[in-house]
Image: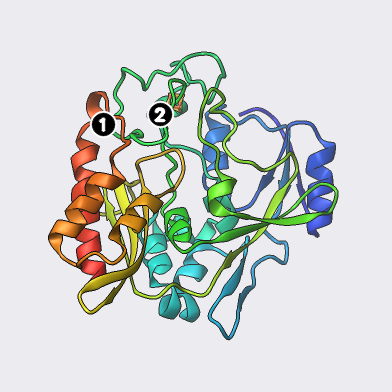
Amino acid sequence: MQPFTYERATSVTEAIASVSKHPNAKFIAGGTNLLDLMKLGIERPTHLVDISRLPLNEIETQPDSSMRIGAQVTNSDLAVHPHVRTHFPLLTQALLAGASGQLRNKASVGGNLLQRTRCAYFYNTHTPCNKRVPGSGCAAIGGFNRANAILGTSTSCIAVHPSDMAVAMTALGAQIETTNATGQTRKLGIGDLYRLPGTTPQIETSLTPGEMIVAVHLPPPPRGKQVYRKVRDRASYAFALVSVAAIVEQRNGRVASSRVAFGGLAPRPWRAEATEQMLRNGKAEPATFSAAAERALAEARTEGSAAFKLELARRTLRQTLAIAAT
Ligand code: SF4
């Protein structure tokens, strides 16, 4: 591992100033992804600013059931928070489907959003990877890519975003609150946080240098039943091959409203808005869900060993919609 210096920040302002001052500095919170990447020499920061003790671990709730979640709330604490369990069960289900108990105890909300892909070639420093070494090529294209993306890909990168939590937050319409190096705060929709790979897969978010996620805002929960389904190679401690976050409001046998987001299929949590439009006012029955599944995957590009994901995603979506519509 490359030598680095370390400091523990006592305020958001101090942390951002320090990261901005040191070239090649990084924030570290739970470290559940960053430390692995540092040990492998994939991330090589020369200075770490520990933000895990900052006062960003509050969960605030409002009478309309909306909430503000501090970026340093752990995944475990968020999953079992009574307000989340009552009003956002989708989020609890997604969080508990992720990683292991020990990792969830350390992993922060902000870190979960910013975790990096688990593409096997990204972690193998002996293979080309445009995300790790820009311009070197992509070993996953034409390689063993069964866990890679089929939506939102480019000819430079077909990696998937690995988070479960972010998929649920996408369906719930989360907004991300940040503070930047000049002290300005902004809120951006979670869909605007992530960039598609294009020709620069190494740039994964729209955050500016030194900008820190300080909180996540969830608007009042949408009407309807919330369901998170995750399909993976083993029952626990595995990333999604396909996951679906679905919220369906059923009235008189018809879909009054819905929210749909995929995980495990794209470089970012993938909101299927066209599918939501298509579901609206449709009969809450298998034929509607099948048509919605076809629509949701219409732009999928499958190749090599990831081709099975197309049918797996259709089936997972159909099943999840059927459960959410009951
Ligand atoms: Fe690297 Fe992306 Fe290709 Fe994986 S898919 S090898 S992360 S460029």
Q: Amino acid at mark 2?
A: Ile
In the image, farthest residue toward the top? 136
Residue 108 in percent (x, y) is at 56, 57
Q: Residue at x 85, y 38 (%)?
A: 21
Q: Secondary structure at mark 2?
A: loop
Q: Residue at x 27, y 29 (%)?
A: 302
In the image, farthest residue toward the left? 286
Q: Secondary structure at mark 1?
A: helix
Disc 2: which residue: 158
In the depicted view, which residue is nearer to us: 226 or 18? 226
In the depicted view, which residue is nearer to us: 187 or 128? 187
Estimate how packed mark 2 is, as few (under 14), some (14 to 19) or many (20 or more) residues with alpha carbons within 10 Å: many
Q: Residue at x 79, y 51 (%)?
A: 15
Disc 1: which residue: 306
> Quarter for ligand 1?
top left
Which quarter of the figure has residue 176? Answer: bottom right
Is the residue 120 above or below the residue 250 in the image?
above
Looking at the rendered image, the quarter that the C terminus falls into is: bottom left
Is the residue 140 above or below the residue 22 in the image?
above
